Image (cartoon, grey):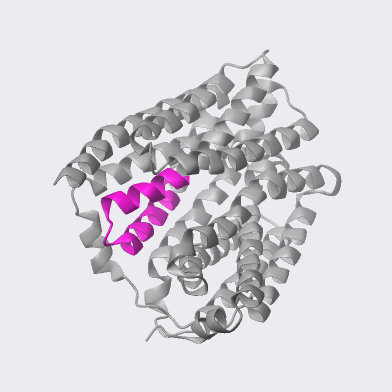
Amino acid sequence: MTTNLIADVRAANPTRRVWPALATMFLGSFALVTAEFLPPGVLTLVASQLGVTEGVIGLSVSVTALTALVAALGMGSLFPRLDRRTLLVALTVGAVASNVLVAVAPNVVVLMLARLLLGLAIGGYWSMALVIVTQLVPADRVGKGMMIVNAGTTLATVAGVPLGVLLSTYAGWRVVFAVAAILTLAAAVAVRVTLPPVAPAAGVGWAAMGSALRSRGVALGLTGFVAVIGGHFTGFTYIRPALAELVGAGPESVAILLALFGAGGLVGNFVIGSLADRQLRPLLVAVPGAIGLSVLALALSEGRSALGYLAVVIWGAAFGGLLNLAQVWVTRMLPDRVEAGSGLLVACFQTAIILGSAVGGLGVDGLGVGATYVVAAVVTVAGGLLARITLGRVAAAIRTA
């Protein structure tokens, strides 16, 4: 049975207990996403101190995504009866250990192992977050509940990563990860204190996800999203050297530009999210197109710093709304299997991070930043066109069937 103490919390005093729990989930997502995407912001510093190339350090994002992919799909099946609050605390403590190991890493091998541990925490956290929020709030408010949790991701981009970059300039990158460990520890304590016990829901399982993947148009549509997200991360993973080389940005300017990227993402999240239900098909082209054109503009912005700044803001706004489009697409394509579709979407997102950061690393080390950004732009736009052609037609066929 999935009935648990959260049902009693709702009936007894939903405001006093549910809102602190959602705020705790927000804090956890902020801490984890900040840690996940700190490497692009401190890429040059870490590579220099550990004596490896920037492309190698960029792969730390790939290894994190790899274990996040596995954890997101399999965590529920691996611990089918474990209280979800206990599991969430354990995952968050794992993220604390990861950040501590990165902070003291003597070489790149230890750093990569630590990032693998962070990936387990992130993938498991997000898969559990969906289950917990659906039990914390009534069915007609799940969207609002997830908006609060997801706001932690946006804030991590707007404030967490830029502040980390700024701190690394004055105190070093190791101090940044030590601070991230302290923040994540606070999130783990908050989870234990504010969340009631959460009984596990029935898992979708591998068979159900396979069945959803075989549904008409789903595999092609997900391929389009992998291309769009992968193209984004091909560029974003190496945004610090790109901003330094193409825009001529120093450490302080990089922090400002990353903050502008995050601010754009915050605006895009709400604007594009409000239009996604009614304008899904045109947005499936417009949003990836905006990402691709922004990345291309950044590649061509040498000597034109104003163009570079504008491109970063538009890029952030477009990417900030992309997840909303993908989620609406899941509900259109798999209306009776949204949970399975969501699991597939998480898997695609992490796969795209792996591919994007890996391709970007090879490109940065072999072709240079500018050429790599051109490739990223082309892949992103192509993915958007695939999404429009395949998903739009299939969605229309489903609605008229």
Q: Does 338 appear in magenta?
A: yes
Would you say residue 105 sits in the magenta stretch?
Answer: no
Visible residue check, residue 338: yes
Which quadrant of the view contains residue 310?
top right
Q: Which of the 4 image quadrants contains residue 301?
A: top right
Residue 157 at x, y percent in the picture = 64, 46
Going by the image, does 5 lie left or right of 167? Answer: left
Residue 53 visible in rendering: no
Looking at the image, is 401 positioned above or below residue 143? Answer: above
> Residue 341: x and y, percent?
32, 57
Query: Which residue in the rendered view is the most extreme toward the top?
Result: 303
Q: From the image, which quarter does the N terminus lie in? A: bottom left
Could you say where residue 208 lies in the image, as x and y percent from the top left? 25, 66
Residue at figure coordinates x 49%, y 43% from the top left: 274
Please report the bounds of the magenta region as a residue range.
323-352
Residue at the location (33% across, 60% down)?
Answer: 338
Looking at the image, is 21 positioned above or below residue 196? above
The residue shown at (28%, 67%) is 206
Q: Position of residue 316 (x, y in %)?
A: 58, 35
Q: Report the predominant secondary structure element of the magenta stretch.
A: helix
| Residue at figure coordinates x 60%, y 78% from the top left | 195
Is 47 or 228 nearer to us in this picture? 228
Residue 158 falls left or right of residue 349: right
The part of the image, by quadrant, that contains residue 391 is: top left
Seen from the viewer's position, the closer of residues 390 and 302 is: 390
Count of marks placed on residues: 0
